[in-house]
Structure formats: C-alpha cells, structure tokens
Image (cartoon, rainbow, N blue to C red):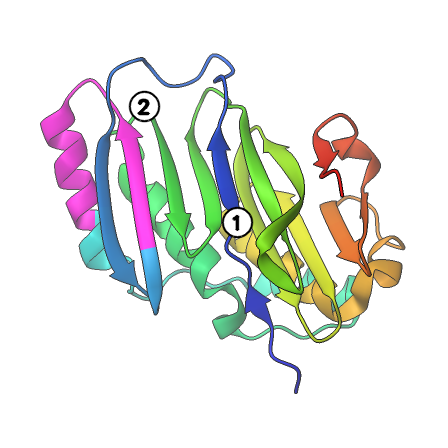
C-alpha cells in the first residue's frame, strides 16, 4: 500500500474579506494526533475565548460524529472506500469549531497543515501548495475564503490533491479519495473544489478560477 502524506500547507495571511477585528487574537498551540494543532480566535470576551480554546485542546482527540453519509457518497462517485482514520484531522478541526461556536466571532484552526476558518464572515488567505516531491518547494497557492483546505500527496507518484470544502471532514475525505484517483480521475468529477498537481503541472476546477496562482519556475 502506497503511503498517503497529508502535506503541510504554507499559510500567508492576506487582507481579510470583511474578516476578523484588528485586535490581537487569543492563541493556543499544542500537540495532537502526532502533529501540532494551533488556533487563533477573536471574540469580545477574550477570557471566554481562552477557556473555549482550552476546552478544544482537552477534547480534540475524542470521538466525533460519524461520516457515513459522506463516505457513502465518495465511494459511490469514486469507488474509493475510506476508513475513519482517513479523516482524523478534518474531524478534529470540525470538533474544535463546534466548541468555539457562540464564543468566538471568528477563528483560524490548523492541524498538521489542514486549515479551517470559523466565522460568519469570510476571509481571504493565501494557502501555499508544496511540490509533492519536495515539501519545501511551493508550486502553487490557492485563496481560502471559508471552510477548510486540505492537501494529500504521494511523493512516489509525484501527485498532490488539494481540496477546499465547507467542513474539515469533507476537505480531508475528498483529498484522500481523489489522491487515489490521480489528476486524470479527478477531472471526471464535478462539484468538488480541487487543485491537482501531477508531474510538475498544476490544474484546478473551474470554480477556483482567479483563486489559484502557479509559482514561477
């Protein structure tokens, strides 16, 4: 079985789209799921936000809700069967977002390079996509407006798949499944916001036109 690597994405903060307030966020960083999780959250009551983030830290490794319907849809559309371990990062991010609901006005969560934006207002953040064969070399970037962005890559095959979706679980699950299909199989699908890199070439779904920038060689 070829190992799948969840690529660490490079995040550059850009101008917020009606986004977070100018005040400094309440921040936390802690180890989770064999990697690191970080959170920056904004809210009117910083003490309450801090307590919510501490609760996130203490509960992020817990058992979350089922993703059976999503797993069924992905298998129907791609033929790929996913296991619960394939969406651990996305599930943990969604669980953290639920903990922050009603406490933080907005938050940016990062678990091992998968990002999730929490908040009624959108954001505008540039997320770098690394070369699947060299994690230190960016090959493209995509603009995150809401929801989550997750990249899965296979260095041996020279392929990476980046998916933007409304939830952490959806982004994580689709990225994992589409990596197994490769770019050619990915383009046969509709309704998924995806950037696929293969053999040095970068392509993306039409809905991401204007939001993807390919790095200059």
**In front of the other: 7 or 216:** 216
Residue 132 visible somewhere in the drawing: yes
**Of pointers 1 and 2, the one earlier in the residue sequence:** 1
Write the residue at 38% across / 42% down.
Answer: 109
Crowd class of label 2 (few under 14; some 14 to 19; many from 20; radius 10 Å): many
Which residue, as the protein is rendered here, is positioned at the far front? Answer: 217
Range of residues picked out in magenta = 37-55
- Dividing the image into 4 quarters, which one contains the C terminus? top right
* Left or right of residue 188, residue 88 in this image: left
Residue 208's place in the image compared with 121, above or below, is below
Mark 2 sits on what residue? Answer: 105
Q: Secondary structure at mark 2?
A: loop
**In front of the other: 165 or 31:** 31
Which residue, as the protein is rendered here, is positioned at the far left? Answer: 47
Q: Quadrant of residue 92?
A: bottom left
The percent position of residue 21, horizontal first and vertical second, equals 32, 14
The percent position of residue 118, horizontal first and vertical second, equals 41, 33
Query: In the rendered picture of this protein, how many numbered marks are placed on residues?
Result: 2
Which label was assigned to residue 204?
none
Calculate the distance from the C-alpha at mark 1 to the C-alpha at mark 2. 24 Å
Write the residue at 53% across / 62% down.
Answer: 67
């Amino acid at each position: 079985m070829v190992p799948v690597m969840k690529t660490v994405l490079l995040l550059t903060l850009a101008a917020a789209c009606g986004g977070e307030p100018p005040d400094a966020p309440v921040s936390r960083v802690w180890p989770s799921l064999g990697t690191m999780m970080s959170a920056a959250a904004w809210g009117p009551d910083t003490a309450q936000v801090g307590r919510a983030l501490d609760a996130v830290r203490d509960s992020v490794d817990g058992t979350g809700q089922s993703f059976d319907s999503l797993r069924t849809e992905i298998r129907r559309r791609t033929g790929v069967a996913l296991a619960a371990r394939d969406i651990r990062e996305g599930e943990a991010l969604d669980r953290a977002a639920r903990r922050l609901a009603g406490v933080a006005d907005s938050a940016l969560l990062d678990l091992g390079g998968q990002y999730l934006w929490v908040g009624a207002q959108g954001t505008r953040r540039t997320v770098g996509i690394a070369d699947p064969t060299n994690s230190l070399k960016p090959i493209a970037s995509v603009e995150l407006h809401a929801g989550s962005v997750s990249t899965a890559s296979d260095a041996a095959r020279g392929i990476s798949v980046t998916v933007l979706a409304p939830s952490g679980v959806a982004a994580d699950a689709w990225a994992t499944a589409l990596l197994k299909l490769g770019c050619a199989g990915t383009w046969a699908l509709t309704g998924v916001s995806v950037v696929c890199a293969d053999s040095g070439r970068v392509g993306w779904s039409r809905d991401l036109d204007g939001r993807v920038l390919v790095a200059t060689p």
